[in-house]
Image (tube, rainbow, N blue to C red):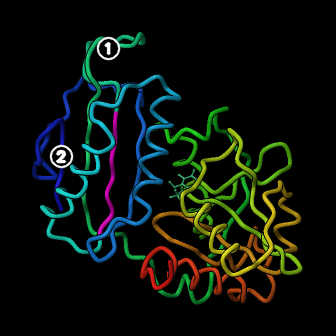
Amino acid sequence: SIGFFNGEFIDIYKAVIPIEERGHQFGDGIYEVIKIIDSKPILLDEHLIRLENSASSILLELPYTIIEIKGIIMEGIHQSGLKNAEVYVQITRGVSPRNHLFPDVSASFTMTVKPSKEIPAQYYLQGISTITLRDERWANCHVKSLNLLPNVMAKQIAANSGSFEAIQVRDGKVTEGSSTNVFAVNNGIIYTTPLTSNILPGITRQAILQAAKYTQMKYLEENFTPEFLKEADEAFLTSTSVDILPIRSVDGKLIGNGNPGRITLELHQAFQRLYVTREVN
Ligand code: PMP
């Protein structure tokens, strides 16, 4: 593992963040998580475009160009000595005496490169359980903001009830998980929540829709209710960390017979071939 703060590679556990850093005083910043497999970042350009979009949404000027950020990421992977890893990039509005107003300093850039979190194989073989929960987040969920308190609370409530993920519901419709996008499959059609300011435009979500197109499966970006999800033939979650995770149950109700569905498995294979092993172009 390796860390990086404002221009220097450092020991990941070295204390380097000043007390008056706006990331931890205000959550005034944005981030990205990128997966590295066999030393290669997956969907790196897509992550960096989202990073630019998040930055401009909060009127934050990036401290480096995208080309420079790419270089820092590639050097970080090299210095970490890891082949399979997760890169975390965080950019905040910098270090300045605490004051809500934007400071006149340049942004802070923090990065960690660490081994990927192990996801138990059983999660993929048997699916994971989920609960539904009221979406209590703000009106700009398309921004990958550091303000994750509602997401943290939702994930913990799910864990306390023995579930892997909290599926959030706003105005009677499923938005997304606390750190994942949500898909349902009904009568051979794949459904996922449309891109609005209510959800994060997941990079894996988009890749899965591409995989669906590639394998000539039908999909619709349409809102659906928790009841529709519970009655679905199949359901799954997507994120950079988990790829595709089959949902076994929602609020205790089994999805289909509970086991991962055929379309879920086919999409996972297509995703692997298109974006990970790149056996097809
Ligand atoms: N929604 C939320 C709220 C998330 O935090 C994440 C993970 N960053 C996702 C969806 C999945 O996005 P991605 O596929 O880009 O990792």
Left or right relative to 104: residue 153:
right
**Disc 1 vs disc 2: which is toward the camera?**
2
Query: Is the CB–ligand 1 distance for label 1 below 8 Å?
Result: no
**Which quadrant of the figure has residue 212?**
bottom right
Q: What element carries label 2?
A: strand
- Foreground residue among 252 and 240: 240
Residue 246: percent from left, percent from top: 64, 78
- Foreground residue among 46 and 27: 46
Residue 229: percent from left, percent from top: 82, 67
The image shows residue 215, relative to residue 64, as above or below, that is below
Left or right relative to 177: residue 35:
left
How crowded pointer 1 is (Cα within 10 Å; few <14, some 14-19, many 20+) is rated as some
The residue at 65%/86% (across/down) is 266
Q: What residue type is labelled 2?
A: Phe
Residue range corresponding to the magenta coloring: 85-91
User: Which SS type dominates the magenta stretch?
Assistant: strand
Which residue extends farthest front? 281
Q: Which mark is residue 98?
A: 1
